[in-house]
Amino acid sequence: MISRKEVATTVPESFKRYVNAISENNLEEALRKNTRRFRKLLKNIPKKKINYAYAEGKWSLKEMLQHIVDAERVFTFRALHFARKDGAPLPGFDENVWAITAKAPKRSWSDLVDEFLALRAANELFFTALDEDQLLATGTANNNQISVAGLGFVCAGHVAHHMNIIKERYLGEYPPLKPVRKKKRQA
């Protein structure tokens, strides 16, 4: 399996924050542990928070979960496209337009959770089935070059990124960051 360090050069700058949001170096392990952590977090979200948005114009947790599902589908489709050596470049997607048109508020929370878990289970199987040649394959999406393995790490890291947002801004689990004080220089 290709390591997280090996994909660093095959991930566009805008996606490196997702790859850096996970600590596992092995893709299979990263996806498996990420799924387990996210499942646990989703189980512990209070019902009163499901339709909560922490500020005006921000997504509710339902809308965020729908976004996570949509993005995971896009990332994995890109990985499939590139792994199968299809050279056609793929377009980007406007996550805000998708969020509005997905109509997540009309969906049940349990259906959204079930959809994510089913999708992730299929994606774990997909990425595990790829050989090194397929994982190293690259293609162009949204005018950026990215590898199949890179997209797998992006899937895990994208979820990790949103888990941090959920904990901090929706559930208030993290204390506010304290300002860093500069040490006085000695003369």
Image (cartoon, grey):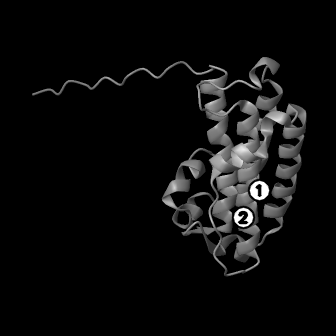
Residue 135: quarter of image? bottom right
Work out which quarter of the rendered image holds the N terminus and state it.
bottom right
**Residue sitting at x 88%, y 33%:** 108
Residue under pointer 1: 73
Q: Looking at the picture, how far across and down is residue 18, in whole percent?
A: 59, 49
Do we see residue 29 in this rendering?
A: no
Q: Nearer the viewer, residue 91 or 33?
A: 91
Above/below status of 11 relative to 169: below
The mark nearer the N terminus, 1 or 2, is: 2
Q: Nearer the viewer, residue 33 or 158?
A: 158
What label does residue 86 carry, if any?
A: none
Q: Residues within 10 Å of mark 2 (few under 14, many from 20)?
A: some
**Residue sitting at x 60%, y 25%:** 169
Q: Looking at the picture, how far across and down is residue 130, in whole percent?
A: 79, 69
**Residue sitting at x 67%, y 35%:** 163
Q: Residue furthest left?
A: 187
Marks 1 and 2, Cα distance to the nearest angstrom?
22 Å
| Secondary element at tag 1 | helix
| Secondary element at tag 2 | loop
Work out which quarter of the rendered image holds the C terminus and state it.
top left
Q: Nearer the viewer, mark 1 or mark 2?
A: 1
Residue under pointer 2: 1
Inspect the image, locate mark 2, and give the three-letter code of the amino acid beneath it: Met
Q: Looking at the picture, how far across and down is residue 14, in whole percent?
A: 51, 55
